[in-house]
Amino acid sequence: MKRRNVREIASQDAVYARNACVTSEVLLAGKWRIQILCALLNGPIRIGELGRIIPGASKKMLAQGLRKLEADGIVVRNDLSDMTLHIEYELNPALRQSVINLLNHLAQWGIEFMTSKKAPVQIHIS
């Protein structure tokens, strides 16, 4: 078996980390995606409810974000329509725990970052 040198391993690790960052950026890009995922932590939700939870986000922007998250397999769309239109969105059950862990890590990092700057936490929602 051929031994890999330290530079090869470091280079492969750097490529892996860069690819992971790009993948994360693509999946979570968008102004409302993180907020949509946070809203879905409590279970299935309709788009109208989502609009009330996330002020400032238009229904169109939320629908686009949900469609992208659905296309990526992170969110599941459930059509519960009988006579009236009733569609709910929820986190993909297979990914739910990993999404929760990701959001918890992001929140913890945010707290530590703001604490290290000794600056008051200011949230700007536009």
Image: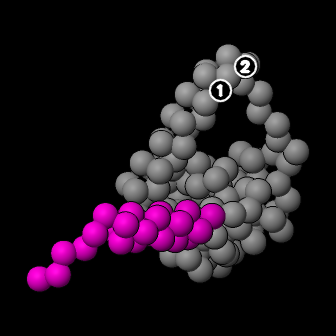
Chief secondary structure of the magenta portion:
helix
Closer to the N terminus: mark 1 or mark 2? 1
Q: Is residue 93 left or right of residue 47?
A: left
**Which amino acid type is marked by label 2?**
Ala
- Would you name the residue on which mark 2 appears? 119
- Along the viewing direction, whichever of 75 and 9 lies nearer the viewer: 9
In the rendered image, residue 51, in percent from the top left (x then y), is placed at 76, 53
Q: What residue lies at 71% left-to-right and 45% top-to-bottom?
A: 53
Residue 78, position as x, y percentages in the image? 54, 74
Q: Quadrant of the N terminus?
A: bottom left
Range of magenta residues: 1-25
Q: Which residue is mark 1?
A: 114
Farthest residue toward the bottom? 1
Q: Evaluate whether residue 104 shows in this view.
A: yes
**Label 1 CA crowd tier, 10 Å (few <14, some 14–19, many 20+):** few
Q: Nearer the viewer, residue 27 or 118?
A: 118
> Are the residues flagged by discs 1 and 2 in contact, CB closer than 8 Å?
yes
Residue shown at 77%/33% (left/top)? 123
Q: Pointer 2: residues within 10 angstroms few (<14), some, or many (20+)?
A: few
Which structural element holds mark 2?
loop
Quadrant location, the C terminus:
top right
For the residue labelled by badge 1, is the local secondary structure a helix, a strand or a loop? helix
Asked which quadrant contains residue 21, the reply is bottom right
Residue found at the far left of this picture? 1
* Residue 112 within the segment the image draws in magenta: no
Q: Position of residue 65 (x, y in %)?
A: 71, 67
Task: Say how many tags the image has.
Answer: 2
